[in-house]
Image (tube, helix red, strand yellow):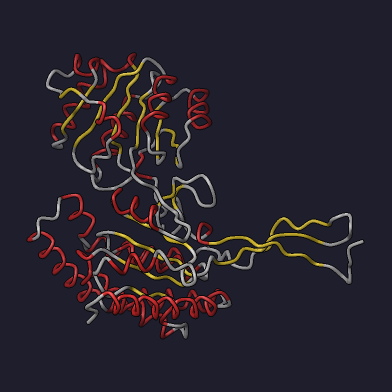
Amino acid sequence: MICNRMDIQQYMSDLGARARAASRHMARADSGAKNRALAAIAAALRSHRSAVLDANRQDMELATKNGLDSALLDRLELTPARFDGMVEGLEQVIALPDPIGAITDMSYRPSGIQVGKMRVPLGVIGIIYESRPNVTIDAASLCLKSGNAAILRGGSEAINSNQAIAECLRVGLREAGLPEDAVQVIETTDRAAVGELITHPEYVDVIVPRGGKGLIERISNEARVPVIKHLDGNCHVFIDVDADHEKAIAIAINAKTHRYGTCNTMETLLVHEGVAAQLLPTLADQYRSAGVELRGCEKSRALVADMTPASEDDWRDEYLAPILAIKVVTDVDEAMDHISQYSSGHTESIVTENWTRARRFLAEVDSSSVIVNASTRFADGFEYGLGAEIGISTDRIHARGPVGLEGLTSQKWIVFGDGHVRS
């Protein structure tokens, strides 16, 4: 039992030292060993399926009793389908090429030396996340395949689920002959553990926070190691005047109602004034049927009478709930201006059959994912073919968008010579 501040400091220091030692082992592990570990983890998950789902039910019961909101409950729940998705994600990561050791950009210099780059692991990655127990597997698999060690700190609401999954991770690593310390799931729910994790660059090379805006702001402000992050997901869909109406309706409904508690869910719908009268009443009917509250601009409300007036905050909010802001715009320029002013830089989509306008949207909208004629819900690592993702980055350096294997690596310069000396 970890019961006081000194115990937390010692626990995290020991955990960090073991992770650093394991990272050196992982950096030299070959692809076969890493893939064997991932396959063994998948097998352990299958054999422990009942135990993991039972642990998740315990977490769900306690979270419901404690009044956790519906968006977080949705993230916490590990349904049989989501469990199967975890295993499938592992299998996809196994099939991905191992990026470590890849040499690129080799060229001869006038001096005769040959210069290039080699892809290498980052080292020890700390991941801090809320609710979603499937993140434990996603993060572990990507860190392992990319030759890193990981320290995982899930939310207190998912402690039983995460510890059940952690046992499967230990079994898989052990069977593959890799150090069990290559992935460590923090066993305490004490928030002081997070403070220790993010302030020790001697043990941790990068932090990836996944969760609410409050958590990510705290990590960004207090961390003494680099942070890969996004604060929120205020995503937009713009229905252009040249949109196919059937596609537009399907995309706008899916982007909002497929799941409410995810960062790639649409929070604002922008509709060209040339098609608003034709599309908004139909869309409003379908949103009402799904239980979505609509908050609109003056032009939107003229077309849908029972729509609530939108406030300035509505254009900025990430609802993570069945609420949608709607604005009628005059053209693509006004749509892009609105996105530039209010977007969090996560994901934006345009629905149009006008390729020139689509290309402008792709080039001028500055978000980590920009989509043509598809739902914002596709903006995640699994859908992008990364096997899984460790998070979404809205930063403009290193990793951007869904962070998969390559985002967990860096490059170092390598030089080949043959007795060359500089003159």
Q: Residue at x 32, y 17 (%)?
A: 275
Which quadrant does the C terminus fall into?
bottom right
Residue 382 is drawn in which quadrant?
bottom left
Q: Residue at x 33, y 28 (%)?
A: 248
Q: Residue furthest left?
A: 65
Q: Is 95 drawn above or below residue 254 in the view shown? A: below
The reply, left or right, for residue 170 in relation to residue 326 is: right
- Depth order, front residue of 354/153: 153
Q: Residue at x 45, y 79 (%)?
A: 17
Residue 313 is drawn in which quadrant?
top left
Residue 140 is drawn in which quadrant?
bottom left
Q: Is 372 drawn above or below residue 205 in the view shown? A: above
Which quadrant does the N terminus fall into?
bottom left
Residue 90's x, y, as percent? 40, 67
Residue 316's x, y, as percent? 30, 33
The reply, left or right, for residue 232 in relation to residue 398 is: left
Q: Number of callouts in the render?
A: 0
- Depth order, front residue of 6/75: 6
Residue 377's x, y, as percent? 34, 43
Residue 150's x, y, as percent? 42, 70
The reply, left or right, for residue 162 in relation to residue 240 is: left
- Depth order, front residue of 40/19: 19
The reply, left or right, for residue 181 in relation to residue 21 is: left
Q: Residue at x 22, y 62 (%)?
A: 78
